[in-house]
Amino acid sequence: MRLLSATLRIYVDAARESGKAFPRSAWAFITLISCFPLLMLVGMLIAPLGFVGGVIYSILNAACAGTYLALVKDALSVRRSLGPASVRANLGAHTWDIIGVLFPLWMVDLVLSLLGAPALVPLIYGIAVFLFLNPVPEMIGRSRSGGLELLREAGQFMMQSGPEWLAPQLLVLAGLWLAFPAQTLPILSLVGPRFGFTTTGSLAVSAGATPAGWAIGFGLVALVHLLMLFRSALFEQLSGRGGRRAREWQERTR
């Protein structure tokens, strides 16, 4: 019971912090909602470049993700509203750190593709990546490690705090899956080391190009933005209070 009480207290604190940060993170939200149309436009323009175009797209995607993550962190740590200057200051932040994480994952994807693995194999791999490496986006900029070492640290964090970390997020993702049942892998990629939040708009497109569809899409991006704020605040709470035994002891000594 003490552990449950400590965990619920952490959720409340993280929700409170993310709720306070939401109104002052408007420019982070604008950045997030701009990522998908920007990536889609650039993707169409560079499609004829083949492999080189794919590399350019990957770098731009990493730059979008890094910029957004830096803005989310600022929204939680700085007690004032973000402005255009904050976007300029964080433009392209953590780009190469993100590429260092994505590259080994992409290599596994390539091997599975070349081997002609059944569709179930990439799904199982995607679920494993989601479960064991989930906090990577929040560790970008907070850890001095990169690449495989950062993935290893993410795995260690999940061993210590995995259930507490995943439980509230799985509730949100389950709701999204019920709304978009054909989008299992994109939904799993929204959070975690694939940095799929940059293409949240791809889910919004499936809602239809109607006023109602656009409203659903806007609300979906806002939901993902709030989830990312919550994740960042929750990571600070969990990493700052140690593993389960440490949190249980802290609750016992209150």
Image (tube, rainbow, N blue to C red):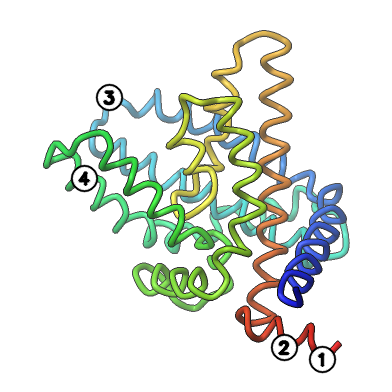
Q: Give above or below for 160 relative to 71.
A: below
Tell which circle, 4 or 2, labels the residue nearer the N-terminal end.
Answer: 4
Element class at badge 1: loop
Q: Quadrant of the N terminus?
A: bottom right
Mark 2 sits on what residue?
Answer: 249
Amino acid on which disc 2 is placed = Trp
Element class at badge 3: helix
Mark 1 sits on what residue?
Answer: 253
Mark 3 sits on what residue?
Answer: 48
Q: Residue 204, located in which quarter of the rendered image? A: top right
Amino acid on which disc 3 is placed = Pro
Where residue 88 appears, as percent x and y from the top left, is 67, 52
Other-residue count near label 1 (Cα within 10 Å), few / some / many at <14 / 14–19 / ≥20: few
Mark 4 sits on what residue?
Answer: 110
Tell which circle, 4 or 1, labels the residue nearer the N-terminal end.
Answer: 4
Question: In front of the other: label 4 or label 3?
Answer: 4
Is 16 on the left or on the right of 44, as rendered?
A: right
The residue nearer to you, when weighing 249 against 122, is: 249
Where residue 37 appears, as percent x and y from the top left, is 56, 28
Other-residue count near label 2 (Cα within 10 Å), few / some / many at <14 / 14–19 / ≥20: few
